[in-house]
Amino acid sequence: MIMHIKDFSFTYKGASKPSLKNINLPILENKVTALIGPSGCGKSTLLRSMNRIHDLYPGNKYEGEILLKNLQNQKMENILEIKKENDFIALRQRVGMIFQKPTPFPMSIYDNIAYGLKLQGIKDKTELDKRVEDALKGSALFKEVKDRLNDDARGLSGGQQQRLCIARAVALKPEVLLFDEPTSALDPISTSAIEELIVELKEEVSIAIVTHNMQQASRISDYTAFMYLGDLIEYDKTETIFLNPKQQMTEDYITGKFG
Amino acid sequence: MESLFKRLSWISATTILLILTSIFVVLFLYAKPAIAEYGLKFLVDSRWGVEVSQPTKPQVSPSTKSSATKATPTTTPKDDNIAVNDEDIAVSDEDIAVNDEDIATDENVAVNDEDIAVSDEDIASQVPSSADEAITADDDIDIDETSKHTKVIYGGLVPIVGTILTTILAMFFAVPIAMGIAIFLSEIAPQSIAKPVGIAIELLAAIPSIIYGMWGLFYFGPLVASVFGGSSVSLLVASLVLAIMIIPFMASLTRDSMNTTPNVLKESAYAMGATKFEVIKDVVFPYAKKGIIGSMILALGRALGETMAVAFVIGGVFTFPKSLTDPTVSIPVVLANSFAESNGISLNVLFYLALILFIISFAVISFAKFYFLRDKK
């Protein structure tokens, strides 16, 4: 278990009711955990709590604990206690995030990937080159872009851009990667490329993925959590959730009776 | 409907082009006598309204100062204050009109206006003491002499340099401050502060320039002078007032284009461990680059052509500024100050200056557009 969410509640600024109520969810090491549920159930809110990107907008309220394993001493540390900016930066480099839409930075392909590495303080050119190449190979993009590493990244296709964003996150060697509906803006071919990539990546990192697409969840995830209106209804192995869910509501959602 | 729409857009685009061309053509036509008279030397000649004795060829190099002054004690080439002189001329003109009506009728009306202007200056320098008869005699002689032996030289270098200096200095002061304001408003300030401040800045951008000029003359100029020394009308004051004028303009345009950066793009930079400063520097600025440069270009154009605010605080003196706190003059100010009293060749000269201003603005802006906004491969 690399992350453990315990009795976690989350209230947006100015909201009277919490958006997430008493969530208990483990994220297992080197496994893919999928979060499914209808729109507005709090999947993305939960995911965004896991690297505290919510804190960019002040006024939100956390309760409970989100524990992240410190790989040096194997201890679980509560990331909700982080206050200092330096610690936020360290956290976000340990817990990377990929968004719904591809977000290439307005710079070259090479610089997009080297950007995070430079932020980590790597200045040596040969090491940068090597890490960039590894990351590109790791995300199956190297063959397509090796001749135009210095072109603007915004000139790539949508699927390539998204793989670039994954490569960019992978280059930092994070412990956990959070995917927030990474394929919802992509065509089927790009989608399957990214799904393959996610399955390969779990050798190295632990993955949490929010998805609207239940087939996708069943294809790539090892564990699945079903959420509904801010509650975690059921969490189990993906086969169990899809084949014999314990809760009636989960079954209704999976069989398409609501959602 | 479709074709009507197309035709309308065609027409409006063509109209703008036509207007632009016609401005250029008119400026050129009016400036033509002056161009023929002074040629490109105008651009490098720093004398303005200076008489020189009998040039058989109109060739005068800026260095020959000995020939620049005439025997008669009229204009001193360096330190004469044109604005003041103009007033004097106007006064003496009236005097003549009132006192010596017979002279006005006696004289050939079609005498070269320029010469009259020159002789009027003579009067201005002598009028306080002498009697009317003496002046008329003097006057007649002068007219004869000047028409044969002297001509008035106009050179545009001082206003050209003044325009470029004020603009560059104003941009130098304005750009960092405007960027700071824009960053503060779009990235740092909480909504509750950013909104009212943003509105206040937009209001500042709407203040007419003459108000900035008056404020500059009566309050800001003396303030600057008390801090940096020099006079309360100077190159420095003019640039600062210009900068203050274009800051709100630039800041609100820059803020708007920075606000177009998608939140998710900023978030993904934060998610890679970037700090606020790094996000602004590496994501927001590059993303909004075109809009930011566009706002600078617009502000630059405004600074180049600004007339009223600068006219109040630049001093209107045809000398090169030796230091920041010296008064000088810029092209729009020359035009505004001298149009009323000009005719003949001096009017053509003003058009020549206007043409130069037009070309400078056009060149600067198209250079900026092509250089900064070209698509990099």
Image (cartoon, grey):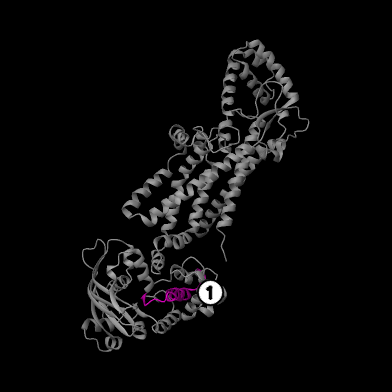
Looking at the figure, which quarter contains the C terminus of chain B? bottom right
Compare residues B314 and A37 and report the one nearer the observer: B314
Image position, residue B161 (x, y; %) = 60, 40
Q: Chain of mark 1?
A: A
**Residue B157 sits inside the magenta stretch:** no
Q: Is residue B144 left or right of residue A17?
A: right
- Residue B134 in the image: above or below residue B247: above
Residue at coordinates 30% horizontally, 64% vertically from top-left?
A83
- Quadrant location of residue A244? bottom left
Residue at coordinates 26% horizontally, 78% vertically from top-left?
A25
The answer to whether residue B22 of the structure is visible from this angle is no
Q: Is residue A74 left or right of residue A135?
A: left
Q: Which residue is mark 1?
A: A126
Image position, residue A179 (x, y; %) = 37, 75
Image position, residue B277 (x, y; %) = 41, 60
Q: SS at mark 1? A: helix
- Residue A171 in the image: above or below residue A61: below
The answer to whether residue A197 of the structure is visible from this angle is yes
Q: Which stretch did the figure color magenta?
A: A154-179
Magenta region, mostly helix, strand or loop?
helix
Compare residues A155 and A72 and report the one nearer the observer: A72
- Quadrant location of residue A57? bottom left
Which residue type does callout 1 highlight?
Answer: Thr
For this orientation, the residue located farthest to the front is A73
Assess disc 1: are there few (<14), some (14-19) or many (≥20) residues with their C-alpha within 10 Å of its C-alpha: few
